[in-house]
Image: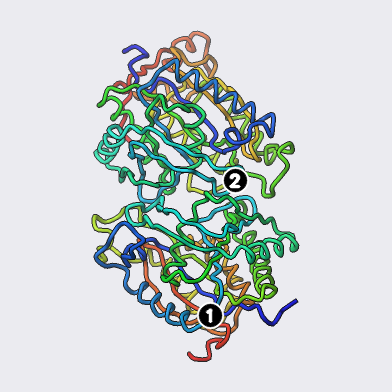
């Protein structure tokens, strides 16, 4: 088994993309806390010092397969179509165009319909702009931004993520993976005073807490497995499925061996804004029920009903999981 | 109140696939095409002739691609000049626009909506980029751009709740739009910027305008489109509103945006026939170009 450090994605982050923490954090203590948590993410990224930020944004929908931003220096004055009253966000980013092209090429090699976009004035989505402005404000790191295909389901999303790992390996680059997504995403239907913000409903709150509990335990694969239920229970159905956890777990490794850290959780205009960090762990947490002994090799059905302490100790899912993507390749 | 002076002179279904502007090759658009989607473009030509004969002050458009999840928003900056790049089809649509907005009418519609209990907001940020649905429908309806426009956002209530809930917002929005226009003293042309059935192909041919690839996504959608068009021909607007939730859900219609409902409501659910200029598909979606003439009320047909 190879050492943990072999995987090209060193950490993953789940970050909200609504503009309030960037444009008006002072208007609500919760928005300020989210802003502060972004600062901690920034510090964590600087510790890792990646070659690039790999950003999958649920706020960039695409129809013709997936799109990959490849303009080396996109520049614009962005205004959110909903929260335009909060102001304008001027931006100028650095995009790793070589990597974007590689990602596109290797996605197509895996049978996907993808394309790069390199056009002046292309409308980069609010979420990608907000996240970059907050975690990479001086453009220290190049980024690559990926769309979320509205028609894609699990298989397409998983393969798309794997193509990202292929590209990182091909170019021998170290990355952090960033998902731009709220947890529950239902906004208030009326404009509210900033100090009146809260999660839209108790149901959304309960689902957010469940997601945070699992992610805090590092159980990324378990959250990914819940994606369809999360879509039904806690997401406005703008798209066919809740995909970001499928992408994140596939780009990082499809298991639960992570250290999860919930840096903050607050409402932003009714939506659940979680700032969550996932780093690699040598062992999964104890006493967790997994669907498989080993997600890479089938070794028979598990008896999850009558485990003894002894058998628990031998469970492969409780043991070291390879973080080398070459060991984890699976056929879909 | 000058009730007699203000008037909606016509309403139209004016869908906004960027492919249409791409195929037109106007100087404002950077990409160029050899041809494509002629039946829909020719339909637009006929509608343009009709509009040219009319005396009107403003084009009011409700666009599915200005998507607001909190309330309905109205453009309220006098002028916009910028570049619009379609986020889905950037290879086809990179359009340099320069347009004027009727801010007074925007404020009147906003005020009227608030009075009726709707959540409304003016969009007053001068850096705002006008959505491509607004631009494409307005370009195809009036390529000379010699009239001011007014763009109304699409409240995404279908996604939040259901098409029924969407109608609960779009019907009163149409009513307040009509009232505001009547009070304004202006003569207005209304555009609902939506396709009918709206399931896209997820792949694009190597030459986007290669029409050998173009057809409806599936037969179910075609049947729905023809059913709706038949009802439009018969002046069955109320019946269209009645089946709108089923139409939206079963054909993945872009009427989910509320634009079609808003239009029929603003036109007071016309019982006279719409003039159907043409129908065609764009990357699998169904698009009809049609006009309700409020003066002739379909008498010429």
Disc 1 is attached to a residue of which chain? B
B246 on left or right of B205 = right
Marks 2 & 1 on one chain: no
Determine whether label 2 and label 1 are within 8 Å by CB.
no
Mark 2 surroundings within 10 Å by alpha-carbon count, few (fewer than 14), some (14 through 19), many (20 or more): some
Label 1 SS: strand
- x then y, percent, for residue B6: 65, 77
- x then y, percent, for residue B209: 27, 63
Residue at the image position 30 percent from the left and 21 percent from the top: A327
- Way the structure is coloured: rainbow
Residue at the image position 42 percent from the left and 21 percent from the top: A293
* Vertical arrangement, residue A51 with respect to residue B119, above or below: above
User: Which mark is drawn over residue A83?
Assistant: 2
In the picture, the quarter occupied by the N terminus of chain B is: bottom right
Q: Quadrant of residue B169?
A: bottom right
User: Which mark is drawn over residue B292?
Assistant: 1
């Amino acid at each position: 088994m190879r050492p943990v450090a072999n995987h090209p994605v060193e950490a993953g982050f789940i970050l909200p993309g609504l503009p309030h923490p960037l444009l008006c954090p002072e208007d609500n203590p919760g928005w300020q806390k989210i802003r502060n948590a972004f600062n901690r993410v920034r510090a964590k990224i600087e510790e890792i010092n990646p070659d690039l930020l790999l950003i999958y944004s649920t706020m960039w929908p695409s129809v013709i397969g997936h799109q990959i931003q490849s303009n080396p220096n996109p520049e614009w004055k962005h205004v959110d179509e909903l929260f335009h009253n909060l102001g304008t966000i001027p931006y100028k980013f650095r995009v790793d165009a070589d990597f974007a092209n590689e990602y596109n090429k290797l996605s197509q090699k895996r049978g996907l319909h993808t394309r790069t976009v390199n056009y002046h004035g292309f409308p980069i989505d609010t979420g990608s702009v907000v996240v970059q402005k907050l975690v990479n404000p001086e453009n220290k790191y190049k980024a690559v931004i990926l769309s979320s295909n509205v028609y894609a389901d699990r298989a397409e999303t998983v393969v798309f993520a794997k193509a990202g790992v292929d590209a990182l390996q091909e170019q021998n680059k170290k990355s952090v993976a960033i998902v731009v997504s709220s947890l529950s995403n239902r906004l208030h239907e009326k404009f509210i005073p900033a100090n009146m913000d809260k999660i839209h409903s108790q149901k959304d709150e309960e689902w957010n807490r469940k997601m945070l509990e699992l992610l805090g335990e590092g159980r990324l694969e378990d959250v990914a497995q819940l994606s369809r239920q999360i879509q039904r229970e806690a997401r406005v159905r703008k798209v066919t499925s809740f995909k970001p956890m499928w992408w994140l777990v596939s780009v990082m490794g499809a298991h639960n061996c992570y250290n999860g850290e919930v840096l903050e959780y607050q409402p932003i205009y009714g939506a659940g804004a979680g700032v969550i960090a996932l780093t690699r762990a040598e062992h999964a947490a104890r006493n967790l029920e997994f669907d498989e002994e080993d997600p890479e090799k089938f070794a028979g059905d598990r008896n999850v009903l009558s485990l003894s302490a002894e058998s628990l100790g031998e469970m492969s899912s409780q043991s070291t999981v390879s973080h080398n993507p070459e060991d984890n390749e699976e056929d879909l | 109140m000058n009730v007699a002076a203000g008037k909606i002179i016509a309403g139209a279904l004016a869908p906004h696939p960027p492919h249409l502007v791409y195929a037109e090759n106007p100087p404002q658009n950077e990409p160029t095409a050899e041809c494509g989607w002629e039946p829909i473009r020719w339909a637009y030509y006929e509608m343009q002739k009709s509009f040219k004969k009319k005396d009107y002050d403003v084009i009011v458009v409700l666009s599915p691609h200005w998507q607001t999840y909190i309330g309905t928003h109205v453009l309220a900056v006098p002028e916009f000049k910028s570049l619009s790049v379609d986020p889905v089809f950037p290879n086809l649509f990179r359009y340099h626009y320069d347009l004027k907005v009727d801010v007074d009418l925007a404020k009147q519609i906003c005020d009227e909506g608030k009075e009726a209990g709707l959540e409304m907001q003016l969009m007053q940020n001068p850096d705002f980029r006008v959505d491509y649905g607004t631009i494409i429908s307005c370009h195809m309806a009036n390529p000379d751009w010699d009239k001011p426009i007014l763009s109304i956002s699409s409240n995404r209530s279908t996604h939040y709740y259901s098409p029924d809930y969407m109608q609960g917002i779009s019907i009163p929005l149409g009513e307040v739009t009509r009232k505001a226009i009547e009070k304004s003293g202006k003569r207005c042309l209304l555009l609902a910027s939506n396709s009918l059935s709206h399931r896209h192909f997820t792949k694009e041919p190597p030459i986007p305008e290669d029409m050998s690839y173009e057809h409806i996504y599936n037969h179910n959608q075609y049947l729905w489109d023809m059913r709706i068009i038949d009802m439009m021909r018969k002046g069955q607007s109320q019946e269209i509103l009645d089946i709108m939730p089923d139409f939206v859900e079963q054909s993945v219609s872009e009427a989910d945006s509320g634009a079609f409902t808003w239009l029929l409501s603003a036109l007071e659910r016309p019982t006279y026939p719409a003039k159907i200029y043409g129908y065609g598909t764009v990357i699998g979606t169904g698009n009809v170009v049609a006009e309700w003439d409020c003066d002739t009320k379909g008498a010429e047909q």
